[in-house]
Image (cartoon, rainbow, N blue to C red):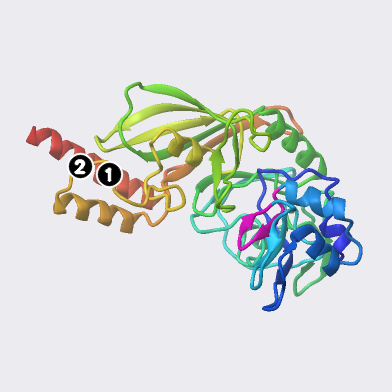
Amino acid sequence: MNEEEVFDVSEEQDEDQELFEHYRIVVEKGQHLLRIDKFLMNRTQNATRSKIQQSAENGSILVNEKPVKSNYKVKPFDVITVVLAHPPREIELIAQNIPINVVYEDDDLIMINKQAGMVVHPGYGNYSGTLVNALVYHFQNLPVSKTGATLVKSEAATSKASLRPGLVHRLDKNTTGIMVVAKSETAMVRLAKDFFDRNLDRIYYALVWGDFKEDTGTVTGNIGRHVKDRKKMDVLPDDDEHGKHAVTHYTVLERFGYVTLLQCKLETGRTHQIRVHMQHIGHSLFNDSLYGGDRILKGTTFAKYRQFVENCFTLLPRHALHAKSLGFNHPLTGKYIHFDSELPEDMQSVITKWRGYSVSMALEE
């Protein structure tokens, strides 16, 4: 491990990206109390104290999975990790014959309807079984990003590529729906710019807890990593420098009393944006375990109702979010193209059950 690389903070850490573990130390039993910047200085050869302090300021140095400042006093058995937004420079990425649902393909792009449970790109401790592993198996010579390099191995050949060949955006592991993958360098550059400039139309369907007074609304709140739980994102105060501007527009599609089906249109594209914004306004996504939606948040205390909700959780063992459609100008022809997808069976089944439940409640009144 090159410590100078690990503590190089010349590139600002992007809150929208996953974090990758670059360095890990378990503190010995006999360690006396010592500032973490001094401790790491003693343990590394090439990292300067200023780089270590800057890494701590950026939230990249964790102790027992929580970010600490440079004046934190190291104690025996502390687990110190350094995490960054980019993966380690050299990681073996194996092409795997994993089925993917391709809904459209031409010389410049691929449209995919992603299934639930599929991680989009490799991350720390999760280097196989991802969409990227499938892409490098099914498609040759996908364009790569300029940062980082990895070895891609297949039975036929070994070539160099990025951890994210063709990717210009991503969906969460348990979010289903439409994704675009670039097949050419030109397409990758132009699509990436469209996402950055928000020059595209993205529609999601979300089943959330609770009812809404109005049929339409907008949630605005800066999003950044949660202070205590690095796996989560959070709506941060406006003056917090780690928060990034985020706007979600929603429209009520159908009301079921205790839950509501929403159409969400993203004005920005932050990590977990819809999930975080909905929790922020008191409407966590149905069965979203990370943001509190995997328990009964609205409804009655009757055992029959509890059983009904549990049955729904069993039918839909993930958060209820689907990337319904994506529209943009084709990166080469300039022609507007639009792709739509049906709701996956698990989400549709739960919506059908809630529709029936709401009808039965109305009849009882």
Question: The residue under label 2 is which amino acid type?
Answer: Gly
Quarter of the image where one finds residue 96: bottom right
- Callout 1: helix, strand or loop? helix
Q: Is residue 187 left or right of residue 209?
A: right
- Tell me the quadrant of the picture where the N terminus can be found: bottom right
Residue 97, image x, y percentages: 63, 68
Query: Does the CB distance between marks 2 and 1 fall below 8 Å?
Result: yes
| Real-space Cα separation, disc 2 to disc 1, in angstroms | 6 Å
Residue located at (84% from left, 65% from top): 159
Asked whether 8 or 188 is in front, the reply is 8
Asked whether residue 197 is in view, the answer is: yes
Q: Which residue is pictured at 54% across the width and 51% down the height?
A: 114
In the displayed structure, 302 sits above or below 197; it is below
Outermost residue toward the right in this view: 46
The residue that disc 2 covers is 356
Using the rendered view, name the quadrant where residue 137 is placed: bottom right
Check if residue 60 falls in the magenta segment: yes
Task: Identify the image quadrant of residue 266.
Answer: top right
Q: Is residue 269 above or below residue 112?
A: above
Region in magenta: 59-68
- Image height of 72 relative to 235, above or below: below
Task: Indicate left or right for 57 with 45 as reference.
Answer: left
Query: Is residue 127 visible in the rendered structure shown here?
Result: no
Q: Amino acid at mark 1?
A: Thr
- Residue pointed to by mark 1: 352
Q: Nearer the viewer, residue 69 or 201?
A: 69
**In the drawing, what numbered circle is on residue 228?**
none
Q: Say whether residue 128 is left or right of residue 278.
A: right
Pick the residue in front: 359 or 60.
60
- Helix, strand or loop at mark 2: helix
